[in-house]
């Protein structure tokens, strides 16, 4: 017997408190600047206010979203634009994002997808430029369209609680102020959906070319006690030629309850001129399992903040990431934080990166094993290949251990060459150096890509990896000939 769908909910619990009024981002007139500064908190720089004003004006009021918007609006009033003096942005060049004089544009209410992307999955969600276009499946809906009932109340409470997220940054707050609706995947207690993934597609266009089109889609995934679910995120540009100029700023919040299991795949292949700043937050309860696979190859600027907290004992977290910088001045940045507060937690993290041409890779992986996380088993490893003398990698694997009865390891390996023993293995069997190099580079990334359980997306990612490695090798050869 299949579990009940979202639309089958019949009971409702009213929200206990009315949402606070939204703050207004209105810069004072010149004659009242001094008086306003005396009464208001410390105000962020003008660039932040300009973007926040535009986002706020575009978002219709919603009782379900207003608490989140108000909290982030208040945070933005005292948040300056990040720069290299901020530790978390020390190696991240944000110059590709709009400056003080460059305008941003926002998507219209009637996005045009012709033809719309298709999915082989039975359950799917489609965003176009951050606007929720469709949600198909018994456990999938937009927050605004969910019928009154326990599922809607649960989702609304989770969205409101995210206003208290203490590790937020400017991109998280921009999303909260500008989000128009939330796509909800709600898997009820005991439901098994791991073999039938929810395919979440984020399509982005290039706008009018005169400004950077900004989108702020948001997804909430809840796996109740004992449930199993698989989700596959796919972020891509929809313009032919792959040169769309836009800024995608998505947030995905995930809750994995006691004994539940979530398999999460994330593929980012944005257009070559795009900026992609993403937040993923995960809360894991007792004896839950969270498996994450990331493959990021697109975008001019790509930054992913991954925040995971184990909220109970005997919790399992498995993270695998592959980044490829294959174009001029491309940046891939992963900032991950895993917090373990309870006994017998288990975690593994593998980060792999190939940096070509003049690409830059950044990895800041923080694992905190706190006082009561005794008998924790945590491991972290990063492996990076630099295929060009102009490529740069900054890695910072970081284990912070307070508990004294733990098994924790971490390591970092950065190399400018492939293993000569592996190359010799191929050559000894009659394979030339070029073919052997191509095979080893492909297998370096395929180790992570093969962990994507949704075959159509896995095969697409493998094909793109092969194509990008070929293009980057040709670019490197041209540079070498020119020199």
Image (spheres, grey):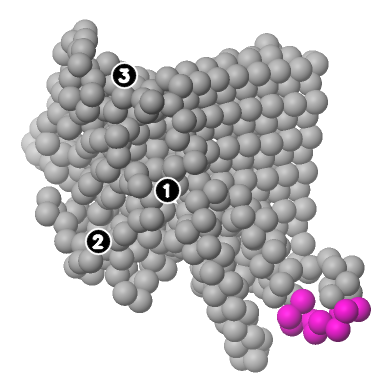
474 is higher (above) or lower (below) than 126: below
**Helix, strand or loop status at disc 1:** strand
Span of residues in magenta: 427-436
**Outermost residue to the front:** 1
Identify the residue position indicated by label 3 in the image.
154
411 lies left or right of 74: right
71 lies left or right of 225: left
Q: Mark on residue 233?
A: 1
**Helix, strand or loop status at disc 3:** helix
User: How many angstroms separate mark 1 from mark 2 (CA)?
Assistant: 16 Å
For marks 3 and 2 on the same chain, the one whose residue lies earlier in the sequence = 2
For marks 1 and 2 on the same chain, the one whose residue lies earlier in the sequence = 2
Circle 2 crowding by C-alpha within 10 Å: few under 14, some 14–19, many from 20: few
Q: Quadrant of the C terminus?
A: bottom right
Front position among marks 1 and 2 = 2
Is 430 in the magenta? Answer: yes
56 is higher (above) or lower (below) than 480: above
The residue positioned 18% from the left and 54% from the top of the image is 107
The picture quadrant where one finds residue 73 is top left
**Helix, strand or loop status at disc 2:** loop
70 is higher (above) or lower (below) than 363: above
User: How many angstroms separate mark 3 from mark 2 (CA)?
Assistant: 31 Å
Identify the residue position indicated by label 2 in the image.
116
Residue 8 image point, x, y percent: 23, 24
The picture quadrant where one finds residue 219 is top left
The residue positioned 67% from the left and 22% from the top of the image is 345
Residue 266 image point, x, y percent: 48, 48
Residue 397 image point, x, y percent: 69, 41
Residue 369 image point, x, y percent: 68, 22
């Amino acid at each position: 017997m299949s579990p009940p769908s979202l639309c089958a909910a019949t009971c409702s619990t009213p929200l206990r408190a009315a949402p606070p009024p939204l703050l207004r981002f209105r810069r004072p007139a010149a004659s009242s600047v001094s008086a306003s500064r005396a009464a208001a908190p410390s105000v962020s720089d003008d660039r932040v206010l300009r973007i926040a004003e535009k986002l706020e004006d575009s978002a219709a009021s919603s009782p379900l979203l207003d608490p989140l918007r108000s909290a982030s609006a208040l945070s933005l009033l005292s948040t300056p634009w990040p720069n290299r003096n901020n530790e978390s942005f020390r190696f991240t060049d944000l110059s590709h994002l709009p400056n003080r004089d460059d305008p941003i544009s926002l998507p219209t209410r009637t996005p045009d997808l012709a033809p719309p992307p298709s999915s082989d999955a039975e359950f799917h969600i489609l965003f176009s430029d951050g606007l929720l276009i469709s949600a198909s499946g018994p456990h999938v809906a937009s927050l605004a369209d969910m019928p009154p009932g326990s599922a809607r109340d649960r989702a609304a409470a989770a969205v409101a609680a995210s206003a208290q997220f203490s590790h937020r940054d400017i991109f998280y707050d921009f999303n909260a102020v500008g989000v128009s609706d939330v796509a909800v995947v709600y898997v009820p207690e005991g439901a098994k959906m791991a073999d039938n993934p929810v395919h979440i597609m984020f399509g982005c266009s290039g706008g009018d070319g005169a400004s950077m089109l900004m989108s702020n889609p948001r997804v909430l995934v809840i796996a109740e006690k004992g449930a199993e679910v698989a989700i596959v995120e796919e972020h891509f540009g929809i313009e032919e030629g792959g040169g769309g100029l836009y800024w995608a700023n998505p947030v995905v919040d995930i809750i994995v309850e006691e004994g539940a299991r979530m398999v999460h795949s994330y593929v980012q292949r944005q257009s070559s001129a795009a900026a992609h700043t993403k937040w993923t937050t995960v809360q894991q309860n007792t004896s839950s399992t969270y498996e994450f696979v990331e493959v990021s190859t697109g975008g001019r600027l790509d930054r992913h903040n991954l925040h995971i907290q184990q909220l109970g004992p005997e919790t399992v977290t498995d993270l695998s990431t592959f980044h490829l910088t294959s174009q001029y001045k491309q940046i891939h940045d992963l900032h991950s934080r895993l917090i373990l507060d309870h006994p017998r937690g288990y975690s593994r993290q593998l980060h792999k990166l190939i940096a070509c041409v003049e690409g830059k890779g950044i990895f800041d992986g923080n694992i905190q094993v706190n006082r009561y996380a005794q008998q924790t088993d945590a491991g972290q490893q990063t492996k990076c290949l630099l295929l060009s003398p102009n490529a740069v990698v900054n890695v910072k694997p970081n284990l912070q251990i307070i508990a004294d009865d733990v098994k924790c390891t971490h390591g970092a390996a950065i190399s400018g060459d492939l293993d000569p023993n592996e190359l010799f293995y191929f050559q000894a069997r009659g394979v030339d150096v070029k073919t052997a190099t191509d095979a080893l580079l492909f297998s370096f990334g395929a180790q992570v890509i093969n962990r994507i359980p949704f075959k159509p997306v896995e095969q697409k990612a493998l094909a793109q990896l092969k194509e990008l490695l070929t293009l980057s090798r040709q670019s490197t050869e041209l540079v070498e000939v020119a020199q």
